[in-house]
Image: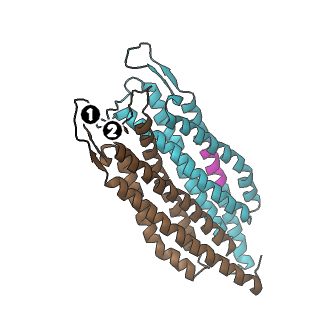
Chain colours: A brown, B cyan
Amino acid sequence: MKATAGEAYPRKGANRGLSVLDLFFRIISAVGTLGSAVAVGTTDETLPFITQFFRFRARYDDIPSFTFFVIANAIVCGYLVLSLPISIYHIIRSKANNSRVILIIFDAAMLALVTAGASAAAAIVYLAHKGNTSTNWFAICQQFNSFCKRISGSLIGSFGSSVLLVLTITTAAIAISRR
Amino acid sequence: MKATAGEAYPRKGANRGLSVLDLFFRIISAVGTLGSAVAVGTTDETLPFITQFFRFRARYDDIPSFTFFVIANAIVCGYLVLSLPISIYHIIRSKANNSRVILIIFDAAMLALVTAGASAAAAIVYLAHKGNTSTNWFAICQQFNSFCKRISGSLIGSFGSSVLLVLTITTAAIAISRR
């Protein structure tokens, strides 16, 4: 379908609106992943007593899933910050096409990465809260209360970023199709 | 840019090629998620001895992350099967646009879901293999060897589907941009 001059302008405006939304999602998402990475990366709780069964100290790098969580969030945050100039370029040149396709592909890969990190950490935090009787893994959150709370809170930033990346892919796909 | 008649035909052919690729990715991905869901959903290992510390029986639904893994894979498999007719429609009508955008959005959401399931299961399987000394969670894979092997194997199908969904989003984005 060929757009007439009368149709072309509102479409251009709508695409600009989508690009602004895209930039907005990217900024919030970058802040969310940064916050999650820093909050978990700086956890270090030592309890003031010791027994023969527990080393009463909890750091994020005691558990590989939390290390992965921090790394995944840091990578995605870095990518999002680097993608901001391209997102701003899309606001200026709303007809840009190839750069949007490239961003969709990277966004999808980063969506997978941040979701993997958040989900692995969620699986372990759930175990830390509830324990599991059939495998004899005991809950540790009674002891390491602030450790567990901080990591649980960080999951919000990370899963929030996943949702925002889905929305980013959505806006980019709509923008390309409306060109 | 307005395509001339001479340009339009190769583009249409290229889009048809992308649509065929898309269908191919969806079929493999559906098989991968189905296999993963069935393999984990039917695990049930009972060991021929019992002590006071362990209930020597392992089923996928003893551990919530594995239940989530099975459900996530089943949902994504169902979605992929339902999307096959639309994918075939795209081969026939390579200029289809809105339906591609809708598929991209759902693909992105399903990518997040299958990655979350696979990653949560991977975090727990890793723990089952290696244990964790700082939290006093012991490895259980020495006992439940075939259980662990089956779940580890299923992760391949599930993470493979994640990668294929990224490729599906890629092909759809390229197809829309080339219209």
Residue sitting at x 47%, y 71%: A83
Instruction: Give the tally of numbered discs.
Output: 2
Which residue has dot 1 on it? A54
User: How many C-alpha atoms fall within 10 Å of the one at disc 1: few (<14), some, or many (≥20)?
Assistant: few
Q: Which mark is residue A143?
A: 2
On the picture, is B49 further left or further right than A96? left
Q: Tell me which segment is drawn in magenta.
A: B21-30
- Per the image, label 2 sits on a secondary structure element best described as loop
Regarding residue B54, the answer to whether it shows in the image is yes
Same subunit: marks 1 and 2? yes
Pointer 1 or 2: first along the chain:
1
C-alpha distance separating marks 1 and 2: 10 Å
Regarding residue A75, the answer to whether it shows in the image is no
Q: Amino acid at mark 2?
A: Gln
Q: Nearer the viewer, residue A149 or B58?
A: A149
User: How many C-alpha atoms fall within 10 Å of the one at disc 2: few (<14), some, or many (≥20)?
Assistant: some
Residue B173 spot, x, y in % from top left: 62, 64
Residue A42 spot, x, y in % from top left: 31, 55
Q: Nearer the viewer, residue A63 or B169?
A: A63
